[in-house]
Amino acid sequence: MKKLLLIYVSALAAVLGCDKPKTAESVQNQPVGGGKLITVLVWNIQNGMWSDQGNNYDNFVEWVKGYKPDVCIWCEARSNYQTGSKQSMPKDQVYLPDGWGELAARYGHSYWAKGGQRDNFPQVITSRYPIHTVDKIIGNGADSVVTHGCGHHQMVINSRVLNFVTLHTCPQKYAFGVSGSAAQKESEANKGGDYYRLKEITYICDHTIGKSKDPVNEWWLMAGDFNAQSSLDNDTYKYSLDDTRFLVHDYVLENTPYVDVVNEKHKGEFKTTTSGKSRIDFVYCSPAMMKNVSNADVLQDWWTASIVKDEATGFKRPSDHRPIYLRVNVK
């Protein structure tokens, strides 16, 4: 079994790599004391970090460099609007996602990859380590249920294969694809958005960790903007336990081995990821990976603690979400 694993890891390492700057050099992964500490950042950066694009992303780059992450997962990783306005960015001026190789290099990442992109809100993963994209998930034809797409990526770190699943589910209260004001109101009244997100997360899990033969012992991380709340936070929300807003995370907790990382590390403490009291951004880890997470938290620092509404556009600065940061000892 060990021999087969080594063969698999060697073969995977040989094909790893995605969309790196031509001048970038591969970062060598050297084991340290039987383990290698890596750090991961997860953040919905709202329209490709709209609030800092007019500043050449200098604040963003400085902020990321301050945490020295090894892996970053960015939701809404496309430049959508012109600086200071809600006017669509002309196609010939759209910097992200194609510019992620250049932008990531500024904070020390040589590799990047994009998940399945169905609209203008893709997720991007960047890393110091080569990335192998296993699947870009949106579904096929009538089965295209994942609104903002999903990505399944792998990295080999300290001779271990790590699986990263990036996602961003439907944000509306009505079901995706419902058009017309009257139909949308009816769908919202019937909790259409919650049931649609359940459909999305079911599809995503079935096509990622659901394909694993040993999901408990393999290393899996699933993260992003779920646009759904968790019953684990119900001491704060005080909803009925059968509230449809819990459907997504109840599904994950009841049908997969995933562990809610922030909840596990902060029992009894509510951690909002928005400007209000709502935790809708999550990081999940499989049990084997969770055992090696040393700490995790929602970041409120010099840049992310204060979320300010831009009155001209209704967007938030620096984003309408807060980031999540975790440390993992890979051994």
Image: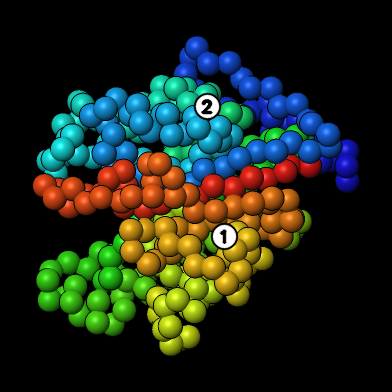
Residue sitting at 36 percent across and 53 percent down?
321
**Disc 2 on helix, strand or loop?**
loop
Residue sitting at 53 percent across and 36 percent down?
67
Q: Earlier in the sequence, mark 1 or mark 2?
A: 2
Picture coordinates of residue 257 (x, y %)? Answer: 66, 65
Instruction: Give the residue pinned by disc 1.
Output: 262
Picture coordinates of residue 281 (x, y %)? Answer: 45, 58
Q: Between marks 1 and 2, how big is the CA–CA gap?
A: 25 Å
The amino acid pointed to by label 1 is: Val
**In this rendering, would 220 be left or right of 18?**
right
Q: Is residue 103 above or below residue 190?
A: above
Residue sitting at 31 percent across and 79 percent down?
191
Residue 286 appears in view: yes
**Disc 1 on helix, strand or loop?**
helix
Mark 1 vs 2: CB contact within 8 A: no
Which corner quadrant of the image does residue 96 belong to? top left
The amino acid pointed to by label 2 is: His
Of circles 1 and 2, which is in front?
1
> Which of the pair 2/67 is nearer the observer?
67
Q: Is residue 213 above or below residue 51?
A: below
Estimate how packed mark 1 is, as few (under 14), some (14 to 19) or many (20 or more) residues with alpha carbons within 10 Å.
Answer: many
For the C terminus, give its image quadrant: top right
**In this rendering, would 176 be left or right of 154?**
left
Instruction: Give the residue pinned by disc 2.
Output: 109
Estimate how packed mark 2 is, as few (under 14), some (14 to 19) or many (20 or more) residues with alpha carbons within 10 Å.
Answer: many
